[in-house]
Amino acid sequence: MKDINDILAKHFSGEASPEEELKIADWKVANADEYKLLSDAWNVVPEFSSHNYDEDKAWSKIESNFKSEQTKVFQLKTAVKWAAAACAVLVVGLGFMWMFSGAGMIEVTNNTAQAKEVKLPDGTTVWLASNSSLEYASNFEENRSLNLNEGQAYFEVERNEKHPFVITTANGEVEVLGTAFNVSTLGDSTAVSVSHGLVALRNKVDEIQIAKGESASATNTEISEKTEVSKNFLGWKTGVFKFVDERLDKVAIELNQFYNNRIEIKGKAKSTRLTASFENLPLEEVIEIIVITCSVQSEVLEDKTILK
């Protein structure tokens, strides 16, 4: 019998014979979870078409990068051997990674410089910030729970009253039915800001309801009072910022979430105040505006710009 790996490649590329499809059907019954992980992985990779089946080309849909700068995929063929406790890694876009493990979990990591959009199996849309990661179970549509392991993300949750949407962080849990909100795990707390809907934020000792336009944060031992959301709480995702008489050191903290920590403030410049708006500007233009507006000096290094 041909290696199941080869038959699976033909099956996912739509080139398997009726006899081979019967073999896949038998294999699928005995390996349902493995099949679902492979199917999910196949579906997130850009379409590959071929009139005549070519085994290497079929696997290249998952395993190679099509010689493209936009999409790179590595090591996914090992996922076929997941039943033997192998681990598979799928990277779509340089630095954007899906990882499948024997525990039936799917991990998504964004190591790029900009936010990336992720579609979850239940229809929820997530914008994952730079240097952030989350993971969820392969049966996510029935068990809508995920872990935000690090960083921050903005969620537009598909409403499902039978299956609440739960996010677990190191500091607590966030639960919703259907809404849009931002979750940040930067530092030693979890901060939630709500665009619309109602969100529950809880830890081991307390719980709070957060409504549209409100923000709150939780540590392991306490939950803050609710405050009005920062006008720039989605700046890391949209690139749109508005500052009114804001200290430059605080301005840099917010800008760095979009510009990947490429601004550093030193000396007297920290207390200088800025009133300005930016909308998806190149970093060089942002720096120029700050220099002119605040009468500070800039020093451009290889990986960052220092304002002083």
Image (cartoon, grey):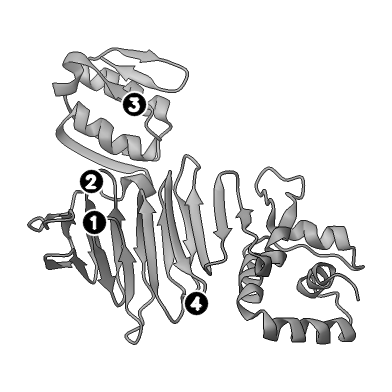
Give the Cα separation between the discs numbered 4 and 2.
30 Å
Q: Label 2 sits on what residue type?
A: Asp
Give the Cα separation between the discs numbered 2 and 1.
8 Å
Residue 277 showing in the rendered view: no
First in sequence: mark 1 or mark 4?
4
Residue 164 or 46: which is nearer the viewer?
A: 164
Residue contact at pointers 2 and 1, CB within 8 angstroms: yes
Residue 174 higher or lower than 91, as above or below = below
Give the Cα separation between the discs numbered 2 and 3.
22 Å
Write down the residue under mark 2: 188
Write down the residue under mark 4: 139
Which residue is at 48% across, 48% downward?
110
Secondary structure beneath dot 3 equals: strand
Q: Label 1 sits on what residue type?
A: Asn
Write down the residue under mark 3: 263
Write down the residue under mark 1: 171
Q: Label 3 sits on what residue type?
A: Ile
Quadrant containing the C terminus in the rendered view = top left
Secondary structure beneath dot 1 equals: loop
Residue 212 higher or lower than 63, as above or below = below
> Percent from the top left, x then y, of residue 125?
43, 65
Which residue is at 32% across, 45% downward?
235
Q: Residues within 10 Å of mark 4 (few under 14, many from 20)?
A: some
Between marks 3 and 1 in the image, the one whose residue lies nearer the viewer: 1
> Percent from the top left, x then y, of residue 283?
40, 29
Q: Label 4 sits on what residue type?
A: Asn
> Percent from the top left, x then y, of residue 196?
24, 67
Secondary structure beneath dot 2 equals: loop
